[in-house]
Image (spheres, grey):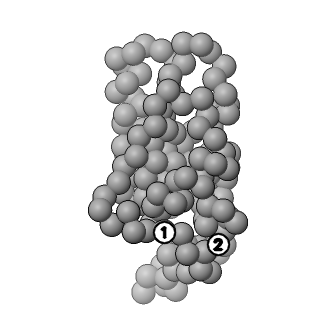
Amino acid sequence: MTHPSIEYLYQPNQDVLRFGNRILINAYGMRSPDFPALKQDPDERRILVFGDSVLNGGAQTDHEALATSILSRQLADVWHKPLVVGNVSAGSWGPGNWLAYAREYGLFDADAVVLVMSSHDTADNPTFAPLNPNTHPTECPWTAVGEGLTRYY
């Protein structure tokens, strides 16, 4: 969905299957499970990871295979404390999108913030151009077969 300061982000509150992969988008438009905006337990640890399509994984990556999901499982095994790892990402996001997101939503009581960046991200500034429905769909497809034919064939 378009956003006046972030440029675009995922429509919040989604739990869908795309191409056989579970895509989970929380109430804040993150590719993460839901969690409260502020910590509920003083022992809880929070990490926010900002990135672009590499971190996000797109429809080709199942929720359980995301780097942030793997990190969450591994740290939970080591720390034995409540843990939240937020995946703040979308395809073609750069530092301008990340900053706008942090200004809009805050940092959710994060203990650490990680930026996953490659050299092309430094010049990837928000343009606020209309979203291309082939790369940033704004409506649900009627059917998977229809989407395959119209979008990929």
Residue lying furthest left: 119
Which residue in the protein does label 2 denote? 138
Which of the 4 image quadrants contains residue 92? bottom left
Residue at the spot 50% in from the left edge and 75% down from the top edge: 135
Helix, strand or loop for disc 1? loop
Q: Position of residue 107 (x, y in %)?
A: 59, 38
Q: Which mark is residue 113?
A: none
Which of the 4 image quadrants contains residue 8? bottom right
Q: Is residue 127 above or below residue 18?
A: below
Mark 2 residue type:
Thr
Residue at the spot 43% in from the left edge and 68% down from the top edge: 124
Which of the 4 image quadrants contains residue 142? bottom right
How many other residues sit within 10 Å of disc 2, few (<14), some (14-19) or many (≥20)? Answer: some
Q: Is residue 102 left or right of residue 22?
A: right
Helix, strand or loop for disc 2? loop
Which residue in the protein does label 1 denote? 125
Q: Position of residue 121 (x, y in %)?
A: 38, 63
Q: Is residue 57 left or right of residue 9?
A: left
Which quadrant is the N terminus positioned in? Answer: bottom right
Residue at the spot 66% in from the left edge and 72% down from the top edge: 139
Can I make out residue 38 in this image?
A: yes
Q: Position of residue 129 (x, y in %)?
A: 59, 80
Residue at the spot 34% in from the left edge and 27% down from the top edge: 74
How many other residues sit within 10 Å of disc 1, few (<14), some (14-19) or many (≥20)? Answer: some
Mark 1 residue type:
Asn
Which of the two labelled residues, at mark 1 and mark 2, occupies the earlier sequence position? 1
Which quadrant is the C terminus positioned in? Answer: bottom left
Can I make out residue 19 in this image?
A: no
Q: Is residue 112 above or below residue 97?
A: above
| CA separation in Å, label 1 and label 2 | 21 Å
Viewer-nearest of labels 1 and 2?
1
